[in-house]
Amino acid sequence: MKVSIKKVLVVGGAGYVGAVLIPKLIKAGYFVRVFDLYIFSRSRKLGADIFGDFINNPKFQQIKGDVRDRDAINLAVKGMDAVIHLACLSNDPSVEIDRSLGKSINYLSFFPFLNAVNEHKVKRLIFASTPSVYGVKTEDEVTESLPLEPLTDYGLYKVFCEKAITDIIDNKVTDWVIIRPSTVCGYSPRMRLDLSVNILTNLAINKGVINVFGGKQQRPNIHIEDVADLYLKMLKYPSSRISGEIFNAGNENLSILQIAQKVKKIVGRDVKIVVEDSSDDNRSYRVSWKKINKNLGWRPKHSIEDAIRDLVLAFKKGNIPNSLSDNIYYNVKRIREIGLK
């Protein structure tokens, strides 16, 4: 059955991925509502530095709000045909800053949200999870059927949210699908420089030295354009193909050292790679995307090299100023800066 979707809410839509996704949704003809705290926006006009001229589009509505405010999230969900949920303290260190804050945002707030989805009979729910749910795996390919053994609160709360969807959402009314996207890379108007490919490219361009800690840890990666396109496609698939499903999504499994070598090759020969033996990040896994390839015929169109080139161009154009010092590009630093509670 094909679901008719015209109105889309993106919770956490003013973030790194949302800044690329929202223009795609508007161009595709959807009415788009963003619900976000906008803590990574510094424009006097709400969202102008993230969405540019799209803020004046009649098919675009912005709501500044906290996902922990059950009344606000209920009103945001009301009247929407579909919801894409991207909101969270997005990465392991961000959650570790204040574990009670991380729990309230990444987990406890999810229950009023799911209740609102049921109450307002939303037709489709797309939830952004993470491969961090897998923890450390020794298998050659990490598939969706393997046990979930997260090492951090961030991964654990994603596991809990996935379980909450299966327990709470009325799947006779709402199609739900869970995406576990790999580590995202590439340029976005709401830039993040605390993700592996982006970190190493920033260091190469602005310091000429790439510091690699450990280096052997395997990381799955995905270009930001591909993950945004995937969320867009999830609004169009018939229910029979995605309802109740969980999909890994990514492009290349690479070690941190391999990523550094790709960055060095693209940025230039003068860049030095300095490898430190120790690392406090033990996560390592090679994710499989066979299920999404087979079931949906989905394949990424962009490479990790494309992401690096996009970043290099953005730096040259001056689109990422003060990249080594401005807290706006770093989740942990920004959360501490504003004193989020």
Image (spheres, rainbow, N blue to C red):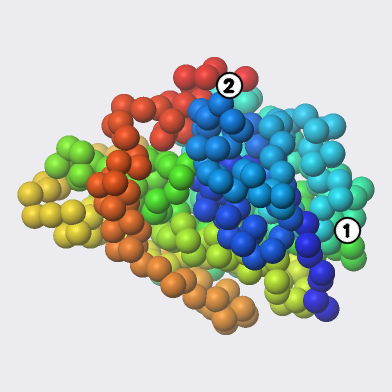
Question: Which residue sits at x=63%, y=25%?
Answer: 100
| Place of residue 329 in the rendered image (x, y in percent of width and height, measured from the top left) | 41, 35
Q: Which mark, by number, is residue 170?
A: 1
The residue lying toward the viewer, choosing from 175 and 14, is 14
Give the number of the mark in front: 2 or 1. Answer: 2
Viewer-closest of 332 and 189: 189
Q: Can see residue 201?
A: no
Query: Within the image, what quadrant is residue 235 found in?
Result: bottom right
Give SS at disc 2. loop
Residue 54's place in the image compared with 339, above or below, is below
Q: Residue sitting at 51 percent across and 71 percent down?
A: 289
Check the image and report above or below for 271 versus 24. Answer: above
50 sits left or right of 145 in the view: left
Of the numbered discs 2 and 1, the one sitting upstream in the chain is: 1
User: Residue placed at 39% from the left, 54% from the top?
Assistant: 186
Q: Looking at the picture, does residue 16 appear above or below residue 235?
A: above
What mark, if any, has residue 340 been given in the picture?
2
Give, as a three-letter code, the residue at label 2.
Leu
